[in-house]
Image (spheres, rainbow, N blue to C red):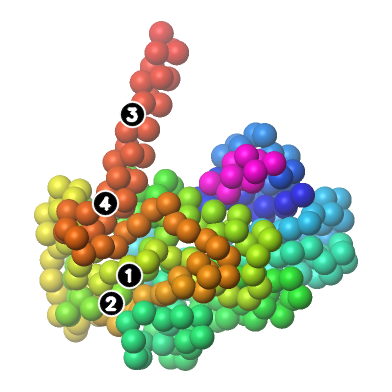
Amino acid sequence: RVLVIGASGVIGRQLVPQLLVAGHEVVATARSARNVEFVDPSAKLRTLDLLDRAAVRSMMAEVRPDTVVHQATALSGMGTDMRHFDQLFATTNRLRTEGTANLLAAADEAGGPRLIAQSYCGWPWAPIGAPVKSEDDPLDDHPASSFSRTLQAIRELETMVVGYPKGVVLRYGSLYGPGTSLSDGGDVIAAIRRRRLPLVGDGGGVWSFTHVEDAASAAMAALTRGLGVYNIVDDRPAAAKVWVPYLAALLGAPPPLRLPKWLARLVGGDLFVRIMTDARGSSNAKARRELGWHRAFQTGGSASPRTLLWPLAEASRGSARQSRQQAMMRSEVSR
């Protein structure tokens, strides 16, 4: 029996069907009845406010899960505003700190189920040394001021979950695929189309990406294997100077503008400059080795510029096709 917290999010929507196909009994929660509508109806659907400690205890006592998967965030409508990142992430940060603490307290009272929690490895690394980091490398002790509270929330979540006897932390890279900012209509795709995602300085910031289906499959792998922290990313991180212009080309958009650091800092803030110039990518070697996790999607490659980020473009095009097909079906029904 698996309790999925945050089942209506972009990963939860992929995870619940995978769990059901594998034969698990699934109880899926979302913060509101409206959000529950996005979840596979074959699961047992519940509403839950993860910040309500009493409600979490009641849910855990009722369900008595074997495993809890914590995918709760509040990222809808985040946009690309790096200056106010902590403010925009405030609720997600509370879900990662207070919400995780509530889950762990309730889990202890409910027999100690396995707990798998979502974290992030896109930008938190210390900007020193090698361009690709493992789970043993340090996080940034001096983050941009607009990212400091978010990084502290990541640290707190990971410390709590790693300290739990059956805790697993899955650090996802920058997510792409249906419902993300890197899908048709998503904020990053829109910014690239409008030339509002410029290259900064040398464009050397290295990004690691994760498709939402791969994020879900990693949670599936962690149901029975592993303890501790794992980076869940593709095999080949890509520098901003590589992935931004190639994705623009694949989308038929004009090439990105180029800005010096000083101007980009005035326009987008210090965090934006750092992630485009100093960010480090992540290695998935530990997850492959200990979880037996394998990706269905791949964003890196050196064979051809046309294929460098094809899954990102295909995810965008695919969701656009799906939206058109759904509109056509609704039109036919209305007739």
The reply to whether dot 3 and dot 2 touch (C-beta < 8 Å) is no
Residue toward you, 250 or 283: 283
Residue type highlighted by circle 1: Pro
The residue shown at (43%, 91%) is 142
> Is residue 22 one of those drawn in magenta?
yes
Which element carries disc 4, helix, strand or loop? helix
Which element carries disc 1, helix, strand or loop? loop
Residue type highlighted by circle 4: Trp
Residue underneath mark 1: 237
Q: Earlier in the sequence, mark 2 or mark 4?
A: 2
Tell me: residue 316, above or below residue 307. above
Q: CA distance from mark 2 to mark 1?
A: 10 Å
Q: Crowdedness of circle 3 by 10 Å Cα count: few (<14), some, many (20+)?
A: few
Question: Left of 229 or right of it: where is 195?
Answer: left
Q: Earlier in the sequence, mark 1 or mark 4?
A: 1
Q: CA distance from mark 2 to mark 4?
A: 20 Å
Judge depth for marks 2 and 1 and give the one in front. Answer: 1
Question: Left of 186 or right of it: where is 10?
Answer: right
Q: Which residues are magenta?
A: 14-23
Q: Which mark is residue 205?
A: 2
Residue 240 place in picture, x, y as percent: 24, 70
Tell me: residue 131, above or below residue 12. below
Residue underneath mark 3: 324
Q: CA distance from mark 3 to mark 4?
A: 21 Å
